[in-house]
Image (tube, rainbow, N blue to C red):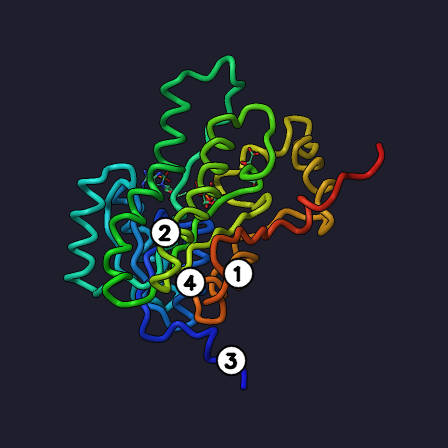
Amino acid sequence: MFDMKSFRLDGKIALVTGASYGIGFAMAQALANAGATIVFNDIKPELVEAGLANYKAAGIEAHGYVFDVTDEDQVNEFAAKIRKDVGIVDIVVNNAGIIKRIPMLEMSAADFRTVIDIDLNGPFIVSKAFIPGMLEKGHGKIINICSMMSELGRETVAGYAAAKGGLKMLTKNICSEFGHANIQCNGIGPGYIATPQTAPLRETQPDGSRHPFDSFIVAKTPASRWGTPEDLQGPAVFLASDASNFINGHVLYVDGGILAYIGKQP
Ligand code: NAP
Ligand code: GCO
């Protein structure tokens, strides 16, 4: 008999990276509402402080840490500190990420490397640091925040698309290497979500008109709207819970249907 308790996260510890605000914060709120203890990090102390206040205001006693997901020594140091302070992490959400929108021929190799480092090396480093605890516990959930750019490219996002495409394959590889140990690694591929990261694509134009990209995305999305961080809350709880224990190596696209739609004839 199916029990709705399989969607609960009581007794579980969840780490969400880059979760002071935006998509990470929204997903962490949902994981907390499902019963998880929340651990989060950000790269700036002031962001972690602000994040702790935001969680408290939402009635969540979160644990916040300042570390850079691309620095393996820092990640390992804080993995040990988190284990001592809070316990062995059951759920990792690799959410921290950046984008640099630069035409490829103008993009330096250094900028390309920076995006790959944060968006792809970061999830590798963080997963590697927390999988041992999952092996000890006999279960684990890793959720990599991919993107539509795990499937599609567009002008100016070469580094980001390469990173998010690689993150889709890292997701499949962690599934392959650790599925036998009852560790499930899946991705969430958000469509276009209204957060600070996409704010430049939605800015009102000097003449008061909508940003052309804003109009383009709304027309291209069957749901006829931008997504919100809250649209990602249910999918995050599902993939973090026992309800998804036989789903592994999958990327769940939460995109309002955009990847399914060729677009209306102009
Ligand atoms: P966001 O608003 O820019 O938040 C990203 C968070 O990650 C920020 O708090 C950022 O801190 C943090 N961060 C950046 N580099 C870090 C590092 N080296 N170590 C630790 N934390 C770091 O982004 P978002 O829109 O919420 O997106 C969150 C995730 O969803 C990202 O992986 C993004 O690629 C993905 N995504 C977003 C969309 C969308 O439409 N918004 C769609 C698909 C996928 P700082 O503020 O200091 O940079
Ligand atoms: C962009 C956007 C996208 C979104 C998201 C789409 O410039 O095209 O930032 O990349 O962030 O990744 O899924």
Q: Earlier in the sequence, mark 1 or mark 4?
A: 4
Q: Are marks 1 and 4 in contact (CB under 8 Å)?
A: no
Q: Which residue is mark 4?
A: 29
The label number, if any, that marks residue 4 in the structure image:
3
User: Residue at (49%, 44%) from the top-left corner?
Assistant: 146
222 vs 205, nearest the viewer: 222
Q: Which residue is mark 2?
A: 177
| View extreme (right): residue | 265
Q: x%, y% of residue 111?
A: 39, 22
Q: CA distance from mark 4 to mark 3?
A: 19 Å
**On screen, residue 2 above or below 139:** below
Q: Mark 1 or mark 2, which is nearer to you?
A: 2
Q: Are marks 4 and 3 in contact (CB under 8 Å)?
A: no
- Classify mark 2: helix, strand or loop: helix
- Classify mark 3: helix, strand or loop: helix
Amino acid type shown at disc 2: Glu
Q: x%, y% of residue 122?
A: 33, 40
- Quadrant containing the N terminus is bottom right
| View extreme (bottom): residue | 1
The label number, if any, that marks residue 190 in the structure image:
none
Q: Earlier in the sequence, mark 4 or mark 3?
A: 3
Q: Mark 4 or mark 2, which is nearer to you?
A: 2
